[in-house]
Amino acid sequence: MNNLLKNSIWVLIAALGAAAVGGIALNRGENINTLWFITAALCVYAIAYRFYAAWIAATVLAVDETRATPAERLDNGRDFAPTNKWIVFGHHFAAIAGPGPLVGPTLAAQFGYLPGTLWILFGAVLGGCVQDMVTLFLSTRRDAKSLGQMARDELGALGGTAALIGTFAIMIILIAVLGLVVVNAMKHSPWATATVSATIPIAMIVGLYMRSFRPGQVLEASALGVILLLLAVMGGGWIDHNPTLRVWFDHEGLTLAWWVMAYGFAAAILPVWLLLAPRDYLSTYVKLGTITLLAVAIIMLQPTVKMPALTQFIDGTGPIFGGKLFPFVFITIACGAISGFHSLIASGTTPKLLSNERDIRMIGYGGMLLESFVAIMAMMAATVLDPGVFFAINSPAGVVGKEAIDAVAKISSWGFPVTVDQMQLLASQMGEATLFARTGGAPSLAVGMASIFGSAFGESMLALWYHFAIMFEAIFILTTLDAGTRVGRFMLQDMLGNIWPKLGETSWMPSVVLTSGLVVAGWGYFLYIGVIDPNGGVNILWPLFGIANQMLAAIALCVATGILVKSGKLKYAWVTGVPLAWLVAITSTAAWEKIASDNIRIGFFSAAKDLAGKLAAGMLPPDKAAIAPQLIFNQQLDGWLTLFFVALLWLIVFDMLRVCSRYLAGKPVLPLAEAPHCPSQLIEDWVRD
């Protein structure tokens, strides 16, 4: 009877989910209620976690809860430390949930709400969650080795070296872009700077509380941390309105960049229990609390989505970014569906904290499901805005015009009416001078969130909600930056360990300081160039961000597929092989367009050639001519980096296929690098669901 009841419940959930997804996909011409999006997401996630994730964990991976993890076997109190599963989940989610699930869906809304929503839902459950969980499992079984080192150990010197170089180079670019986004979010914003800064000492207090003052008292430490975080948020607002104190936190971008570099270095060398894990754990409360509050507000208000399902910009003429629906919607929305950066966290800090393999499903698959839900919420926050307002905020001045009257005329001509008075009133309500051409996705997302919060909890506090949302986005980004820097240090130590084994020891302090400094210097250089360049500098690398991120995911799935085949599980290789084939197709197509397209809004080299021609002909105004050489160099750098990354990807794919074919033909291949089984001393009673 119990089984019949359970099965009936899951049938109902499946039917409800199918109806919600069908309603979203088939709706045309009428506004659709946002409750359909929440219903579709929760039903799809529930079914995927209960059945698909459980099957992968039990059958494909054969998770063993009696096996000691690297955190237990190699516990050194610094990098390897068995940690409470909820703290590990909080750290993992905070580390993977950067700007991608917030900004990507917002920008992709220029195509309409439908393509991005479907990709977020099904890309996550079939691709992103699988990548995260499988990579976490494989790294845990291999002494928490990095993705690049696993590739070298399993595929061989050629593919492994390519993976090591590719992942590290992509990592540097990803962190640099994240750093620039967080600097821009905090620049001349005392509230955001003060609040984000306060999370650092608060995290250290919580870490010391759980480590020394009250060991094991997670609930006490969590309550203390949450109270201090709420005080920090309120204190940030108070500082922002205090003429004397706000000066201390009101800084130029370059000053903040140096502080961000210093923070990244500290996060990479300090014991993980002291700063990284508790800070990410506490940041998760802010993230989940805000997303939960947003969900509650949406359920209360039940706003309708005003953006059409599909816009005319699917043909590639979009004002926010150039390129057709395929492949650019899949490149723009990375972290909300599948993100290669997650594989670096899943093979970096997280397996060094994991105390039991049974938690891999919850942390790996469940953590990515939660990020996907964040992306769905971001999509809703962006699409409940009037489309005219959305495009006015996100369209660059170079596309719609520098003057407000020109911008509204251009946007209205697309069929999305908006007025100057409407935009001025909105900016005033948000406490801003103007909202025109506030590109990047973050401001429009903040406006959408503030509008929903204001309607649900008080229209008089719109400015408060707007600046809270900006601060919320900054916290999202900074937690990814600190974990990424530490993972970069692990990756560099793995590479240098092949030259001098002593440098590969993750806890040898000279190696820790040296490699941390080199990693920070790498991404710090690009961050510095971006901050001092009046036209953005490294901002021009942002289109490369999505392509590189998806290529990194493809590399992770290559390694996973190769290991599955070598483990005698060919019949299950499709689990990682299918999303791998899809990623190779979309990244290769996008890379080809970015390299070879004659459209200057798409092609890197064509944009550089066009700008060089205008510079030579004297067609540029003096201010643009002064920075044109730097812009030309950056466009060309983008093109060559794209070519380099796609060449590395295909090299790794072919090397993986070579290894698999040799194994299936009975020819010798490198043995599996899995660590020997060691019984765990930390086993607790549990029941498999």
Image: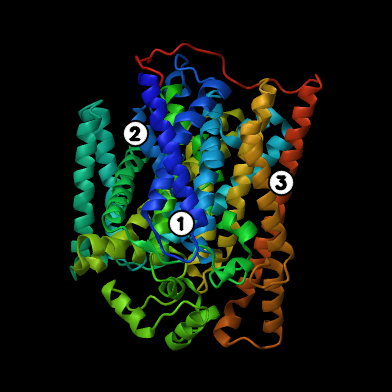
* 278 vs 403, nearest the viewer: 403
Whole-percent x and y of residue 358?
44, 22
Name the residue that disc number 3 marks. Answer: 648
Going from N to C along the chain, the mark reached first, 2 or 3, is 2
- Residue ID at (38%, 35%): 89
- Residue ID at (46%, 53%): 23
For residue 506, which numbered disc appears in the image? none
* 109 vs 634, nearest the viewer: 109
Name the residue that disc number 2 marks. Answer: 87
Locate residue 493: give its quadrant. top right
Label 1 is placed on what type of residue?
Answer: Gly
Are circles 1 and 2 on residues that touch, CB within 8 Å? no
Whole-percent x and y of residue 139?
54, 29
Which numbered mark, 1 or 3, is in the foreground of this view? Answer: 3
Name the residue that disc number 1 marks. Answer: 179
Label 1: element kind: helix
Whole-percent x and y of residue 107?
49, 63
Instruction: Work out how far the residue at label 1 is from the one at label 3, CA to CA, in angstroms.
Output: 25 Å
Whole-percent x and y of residue 9?
38, 31
* 386 vs 525, nearest the viewer: 386
